[in-house]
Image (spheres, rainbow, N blue to C red):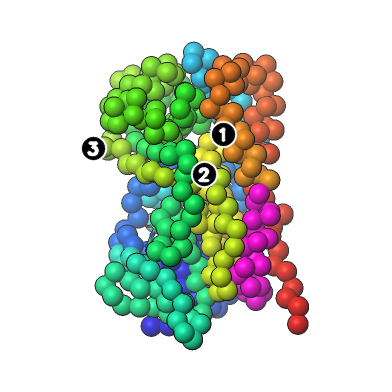
Amino acid sequence: MQDEVLILGGGVAGCAASIALARKGRSVTLIERELMPRHKVCGEFLSGEALEDLHALGIDVAVLGAVPIPYVRLAAARRAAEAPLPFPAASLTRKTLDTALIAEAIAAGVRVERGRSVQALSRTTTGMWQATLDDGISCEAPTVFLSTGKHDLRGHPRPKDPQRWVAFKMYYRLAPAQAAELASASELMLYPGGYGGIQPVEGGIANLCCVVQQRYLARAGHRWDGLLAKMQQDCPHLAMRLAGAEPLLNKPIAITHIPYGHIRRTTQNGLYCIGDQAAVIPSFTGDGISIALHTARCAAAAFLADEPAPLFQARLRSALLPQMRLAEFAANGLNNALARAVLPFCLRVWPGVMRITAQLTRVATQHSDVAPQAIAG
Ligand SMILES: Cc1cc2nc3c(=O)[nH]c(=O)nc-3n(C[C@H](O)[C@H](O)[C@H](O)COP(=O)(O)OP(=O)(O)OC[C@H]3O[C@@H](n4cnc5c(N)ncnc54)[C@H](O)[C@@H]3O)c2cc1C
């Protein structure tokens, strides 16, 4: 089979790009390895930019049950402080969001192949891109959008993660008093060796998502029970939130080797890398989905304007670099004992800290797009 564009990976970025292209009349096939959307390791925080992009795609998060998140709370050791978020935000499970995005892609005319995994992506002698699927069948197209998220395709690796991060997600039904106290805040908890976030999602449940370094996990005996106990010991705020809570998954979902800070330098003609395949921002910013939507929108615009993929990728890198480096710098700060001790205090006496950090670590909005460049002659 042959299409104008093949999109590999039907998460946030892949769906968003496919919708944008199909709405402009392009023939698009999207290949997604899962038959149905599943839970993903994600804090499920939707920033203001993500909400804008989803709205433009026709996704009404309020109708899907998204919980508005007007506050952020920061907890470290025995201190906690709260500040209003300087932009509208919400939370929604990835399962619900991904289901809505796939449905929107199908409605836009995208041919969606689900339950089929891409094994390799290579170039044919005629210059076409060829994706080989797990059943041995190949699909060819002159243009490919690579949107496999955290998963690298053979021949298209990202650099290794030197800090060896591991992330976990678990849903809980909190005890009523704790659910009432969490209310509609996103809580960021800091401990030596990582950080975690807890926030309400639709259905009256809470999402606990945490990121830890391998050595912290090793000290917890490489076990979820041990890790949970250690995080609660290091951050009593978490112990308080989880008192009497009921876990809702048999075991947490986990991923390893997250190359935080990676921004793709270059690509080949006809290959646009988007979402986590373009850039991986530290999770505490809650900005990964927004970057996925942003890079998808910009790549679709670049393709429609005939901008060569290598030029697009280089410009995207320059546009993302300042915010990414700042987010990395802040993430390293969270890992510092002194910063952990003083941050909640700073937030309490000067709530503007949160506004400034949130704005500086945010990636370009609709108004500061990576506009496609005119191609010389
Ligand atoms: C711990 C943690 C917490 C986070 N919290 C937040 C948060 O609160 N807010 C936020 O905005 N961002 C958050 N993020 C980041 C966010 O989850 C990602 O940036 C975002 O999901 C990237 O979207 P994507 O489309 O690139 O990838 P994904 O959404 O992961 O989609 C990739 C898709 O490709 C498919 N796929 C993979 N390999 C293949 C293959 N070989 N063949 C076919 N299909 C394939 C997968 O099944 C998947 O559906 C968090 C990340 C982590 C690690």
Locate the C terminus by quadrant. bottom right
Is residue 314 within the magenta segment? Answer: yes
Residue 31 appears in the figure = yes
Residue reaching furthest to the left = 250
Identity, as a three-letter code, of the amino acid under mark 3:
Asn
Q: Is residue 29 left or right of residue 272?
A: left
Q: Which residue is mark 3?
A: 250
In the rendered structure, are the residues bearing label 1 and label 2 in contact, judged by CB atoms less than 8 Å apart? Answer: yes
The answer to which of marks 1 and 3 sits earlier in the sequence is: 3
SS for dot 3: loop
Question: Compared to 207, does 120 lie above or below?
Answer: below
- Give the quarter of the image for residue 154: bottom left
Q: Is residue 64 visible?
A: no
Question: Which percent across, then down, holds residue 199?
Answer: 45, 32
- Assign a secondary structure to mark 1: helix
Span highlighted in magenta in the image:
302-321
**Tag in front: 1 or 3:** 1
Main SS, magenta region, reads helix
Res 331 label = 1
For image coordinates 46% across by 77% down, the residue present is 123
Q: Secondary structure at mark 2?
A: loop
- State the residue position of label 2: 260
**Residue 49 placement (x, y as % from top left):** 61, 48
Q: Residues within 10 Å of mark 1 (few under 14, many from 20)?
A: some
* Residue 244 circle label: none
Query: Is the distance from the Cβ of mark 2 to the nearest ligand 1 atom less than 8 Å?
Result: no
C-alpha gap between disc 2 and disc 3:
28 Å
